[in-house]
Amino acid sequence: MPDTRIEKDSLGEMEVSTNAYYGAQTARAIQNFPISGEPMPWEFIRAHVLLKKAAATVNRDLGLLQPEIANAIIQAADEVIAGADWSKGQFPVDIYQTGSGTSTNMNVNEVLATRANEILATKGAAHKGAPDGNPGLSLSPFKAPSFTANRPRTISP
């Protein structure tokens, strides 16, 4: 069995570790921003995952996201927050990156969507947790990281 898989996005194909829950955009960010070797701090990732969980909850309650998809995203977020073994090493994007944290935002979306897809598949549902759609629904990819950066100590589960 190969150690990598091919992931595709709007910019093309990327080779990604078979153990990774992230996809092409995160792999591209790792390749493009090997600046410090230091990933985003856990407190930032945790706060950003909480934001995604809140968005999934609200979008479900507003009828914008199917309940089974929202619940899978919420479960995936809860697992990350709890420090599930599968989530270790899944947020490798360098703390120094271009833009407003879009690479970290997509890293979180990809990880939550992939885990949500696993959860849905074990329940017999189709794979529906698109990383650029469902976990980030109603959240600006440019503003969400800025919001998170200003509140990691004030957001609680």
Image (spheres, rainbow, N blue to C red):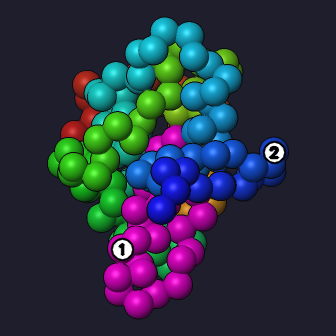
Identify which residue, 42 or 61, lies in the foreground: 42
- Specify whether residue 120 is painted magenta: yes
- SS class of the residue under badge 1? helix
Q: Secondary structure at mark 2?
A: loop
Q: Identity of the amino acid at label 1?
A: Ile
In this rendered view, identify the residue nearer to me: 59 or 76. Answer: 76
Residue type, label 2: Leu
Q: Position of residue 89 (x, y in %)?
A: 35, 37
Name the residue: 48% across, 62% down.
Answer: 1
Q: CA separation, marks 2 and 1?
A: 28 Å
Looking at the image, is mark 2 or mark 1 earlier in the sequence?
2
Question: Hey, which quadrant is residue 64 in on the image?
Answer: bottom right
- Left of 144 or right of it: where is 42? left
Q: Total number of numbered labels?
A: 2
Please say whether residue 100 is visible from this viewpoint.
no
Q: Residue at x 44, y 31 (%)?
A: 92
Range of the magenta residues? Answer: 107-131
Left or right for 130, reference 147? right
Looking at the image, which residue is at 67% across and 23% down?
32
- State the image coordinates of residue 139 (x, y, percent, origin top left): 58, 47
Q: Position of residue 20 (x, y in %)?
A: 45, 49
Most common secondary structure along the magenta stretch: helix
Left or right of 124 in this view: 88 = left
Judged from this view, the residue extending furthest toward the right is 11
Q: Which residue is mark 1?
A: 119
Q: Is residue 114 above or below residue 149?
A: below
Residue at the extreme top of the image, as rendered: 36
Neighbourhood count class around disc 2 (C-alpha, 10 Å): few under 14, some 14–19, many 20 upward = few
- Disc 2 designates what residue? 11
